[in-house]
Amino acid sequence: MILMNSYANPVRVGVAGATGYTGVELLRFLVRHPGARIAAAMGSPGSTARRVPSLARVWDAPVEGLDLDTLASSADAVFLALPDEVSAEIAPALVSRGKRVFDLSGAFRLRDADQRRRWYPHSPDLPASVVYGLTERYRNDLAGSPLIACAGCYPTAALLALLPLVSAGLVDGPIIIDAKSGVSGAGKTPTERTHFSECHGSLSAYGVFSHRHAAEIEQELGVPVTFVPHLVPIDRGILETIYVTLPRGASGTDVAAALESAYADSPFVRLTGNDLPEIKHVAHTNFCDIGWRINDRTRQIVLVSCIDNLVKGAAGQAVQNFNVAFGFDERLGLN
């Protein structure tokens, strides 16, 4: 890939949904990105102009109310950190005006029409040009797409750990994903489940057999999974413990070789081998850390995959996709 050789004319970018957890992270990354100039920062529909206290002296301009015409006229690339139903409406409108769109909602992630109808009923149609925005898997497709549907947080951690093994035929039998996320993964809008007195000092499973991210994981793997998410009383981070079985005749050497080959040129995937990763190792970074251990007697593999849900699981991955799509160094603005 040819990298842009000058930042004299940075890409004009807009961020919609800039007051949410993910939107604030996007502004933090983009304001220091030498190849990007923030041309518009807007909230969600119905919001009014306001400043974000946590961005003082980082981004001091107010976050304006959402206005599609202003967004389209101000920016060449637009990041949408909006509810699914809002992205479903405005992403195609922006694409039709020649904008590159990086959508962080789930509106365009699922290719199967029935699954999309079930989980994202506001997205009846899928634009032909959409690319699923898991950078490490679809890196070569990003440059040609005007609409990138950035991968979900839980699927990012699961897929980065599992894709190399499934592709290499190193998984025999069921896949069980035990996933745990910090409370920010539920978004900024308060709910009974995310109330401090409900989640503090507790740990709970939710969405068993009814979480939309299972469909996203199965789509990319091409095989069924058992996916059980849990809410843990921390502000950010995802840790997934994944259980699979090796086929007869396969070994730990094969597992290591598959993972190392898959991520030899991926700057944001760190393979830790027998040293199992922890959330604190990846918090506030765009890294996905993957460790594993194998029981030779039972052929069982335990994989542990960790990301920061707001960075590699959302804003950081969106900027990583932006970098690849526009020909920048993949790490720009993220290290």
Image: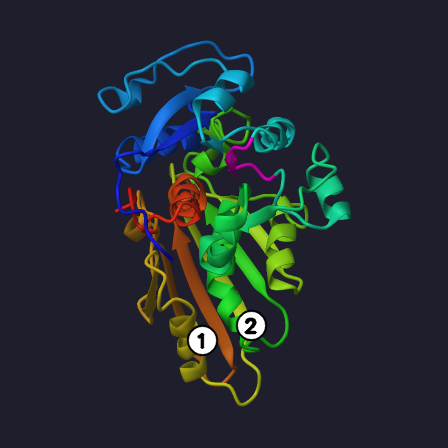
Q: Are marks 2 and 1 in contact (CB under 8 Å)?
A: yes
In the image, residue 211 above or below residue 174: above
State the quadrant of the N terminus. bottom left
Which residue occupies the foreground of this view, 69 or 23? 69
Residue 272, located in which quarter of the rendered image? Answer: bottom left
Q: Is residue 171 left or right of residue 5?
A: right
The image position of residue 25, as x and y in percent, is 36, 33
Residue 125, located in which quarter of the rendered image? Answer: top right
Give the amino acid at mark 1.
Answer: Ala
Please give the residue where the numbered disc 1 appears in the rendered image.
258
The image position of residue 49, as x and y in percent, is 42, 10
Q: Who's the residue at 60% across and 27% down the image?
A: 90
Give the amino acid at mark 2.
Answer: Ser
Write down the region rendered in magenta: 98-106
| Residue 99 shown in magenta | yes
| Residue 184 shown in magenta | no
First reached walking from the N terminus: tag 2 or tag 1: 2
Category of crowding for the residue at label 2, using alpha-carbon neighbours closer than 10 angstroms: few (below 14), some (14–19), many (at least 20):
few
Q: Who's the residue at 30% across and 44% down the image?
A: 334
Residue 167 disc label: 2
Total marks placed:
2
Secondary structure at numbered mark 2: helix
Which residue occupies the foreground of this view, 275 or 79? 79
Secondary structure at numbered mark 1: helix
Q: Who's the residue at 63% across and 74% down the image?
A: 173
